[in-house]
Image (tube, helix red, strand yellow):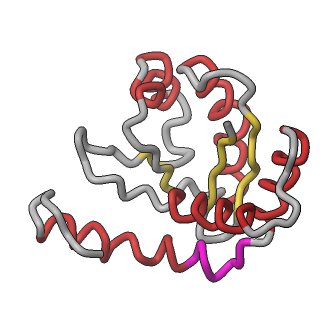
Amino acid sequence: MVWGMFSWHDLGPLIRVEQHLNSTTYLSIIADQVHLIMLMVYPNGDGFFQQDNAVCHGAYIVQEWFQEPEGDFILLRWPPQSPDLNPIEHLWDEVKRAIRQLVPQPSNLTELDSAIHQAWCQIPRITFQHLVESMPRRIAAVLKAKGGPMKY
């Protein structure tokens, strides 16, 4: 598994997760990576961090940690049973498409890891900037549909 993040400004690091992404592993990622990146990219504390409702994101130790860096950035609340609006899913699709086009295909985990990182680094800046800019429209569409099915 690979964990990643991005902002309007840039792509963040990709972190290879060797084991299942549980709350302890996720906490180490956010404490070691996310906090520092958010401070660098948003030194005025005006950055937003979005996460979906994965079980590890809602764990008590993770929620408790997010109370500590108060003022460094804003954690967006993600309502339960919300539509999956997480824009990073679009970037994962970009990575998967790039890897599917490789000839030959990666034949082991080392080659796959390298291919994932290469595909990630080749995502054009305009792609992730458009994703960030699309969020208000996407949220408005969800609200208009009252959480029901929508075409977006």
Residue 31 placement: quadrant? top right
Q: Is residue 136 above or below residue 22?
A: below
- Main SS of the magenta segment? helix
Query: Is residue 82 among what the camera can see?
Result: yes
Residue 72 in the magenta stretch? The answer is no
Is 18 in front, or is 139? Answer: 18
Q: Residue furthest front?
A: 104
- Residue 113 place in picture, x, y as percent: 83, 46
| Span shown in magenta | 123-129
Question: What's the residue at 55%, 35% (across, down)?
Answer: 69
Question: What's the residue at 56%, 45% (across, down)?
Answer: 72
Residue 142 placement: quadrant? bottom left
- Residue 79 place in picture, x, y as percent: 25, 43
- Residue 110 place in picture, x, y as percent: 90, 41
Residue 128 in the magenta stretch? The answer is yes
Is 151 in front, or is 72? Answer: 151
Q: Residue furthest bottom?
A: 126
Question: What's the residue at 33%, 44% (across, down)?
Answer: 77
Residue 139 placement: quadrant? bottom left
Please state, as top left, top right, bottom left or bottom right, where the C terminus lies in the image: bottom left
Q: Is residue 95 above or below residue 53?
A: below
Please state, as top left, top right, bottom left or bottom right, where the N terminus lies in the image: top right
- Residue 102 place in picture, x, y as percent: 81, 66
Question: What's the residue at 9%, 61% (across, down)?
Answer: 146
